[in-house]
Amino acid sequence: MILDTILNRRQASIKRHLAKTFTWRIIGTLDTMVLSWFVTGNPMTAVKIGGLEVFTKMVLYFIHERVWFRLNFGLPHRPENSDKNV
């Protein structure tokens, strides 16, 4: 049971990556909107900028997360088949 828990924590799932993608995007988009409002002085421009970047950066982050998941860089060696269904 303990071994299963340890092994499962090392294998991030697509659901976890998606959840991290959405929560990080909320934080990042709010930051972008505040900075855009500060720079432009126009809250509507800030909302437009934030609305545009939210989708592009979500896709880019998800791809980035999946690429890093497949790399063994900085991790103990994983079996070759450990990420086929994840």
Image: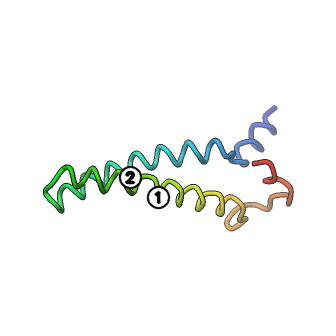
Q: Residues within 10 Å of mark 2 (few under 14, many from 20)?
A: some
Q: Is residue 51 left or right of residue 68?
A: left
Choose the circle earlier in sequence order: 2 or 1. 2
- Residue at figure coordinates x 39%, y 57% from the top left: 53
Q: Is residue 79 left or right of residue 24?
A: right
Q: Residues within 10 Å of mark 1 (few under 14, many from 20)?
A: few
- Residue at figure coordinates x 29%, y 53% from the top left: 48
Which corner quadrant holds the N terminus?
Answer: top right
Q: Nearer the viewer, residue 59 or 38?
A: 59
Q: Is residue 23 left or right of residue 36?
A: right
Q: What is the spatial separation of the Cα atoms under label 2 and label 1, in whole angstroms? A: 12 Å
* Amino acid identity at mark 1: Thr
Q: Nearer the viewer, mark 2 or mark 1?
A: 1
| Residue 12, above or below 68 | above
Q: Is residue 52 left or right of residue 39?
A: right
Q: Secondary structure at mark 1?
A: helix
Q: Secondary structure at mark 2?
A: helix
Name the residue beneath numbered marker 1.
Answer: 56
- Residue at figure coordinates x 54%, y 46% from the top left: 20
- Which numbered dot is residue 30? none
Residue 21 percent location from the top left of the image: 52, 49
- Residue at figure coordinates x 75%, y 60% from the top left: 76
The extreme left residue here reads 41
How many numbered marks, from 0 up?
2
Q: Nearer the viewer, residue 11 or 49?
A: 49
Name the residue beneath numbered marker 2.
Answer: 28
| Residue 42, above or below 2 | below
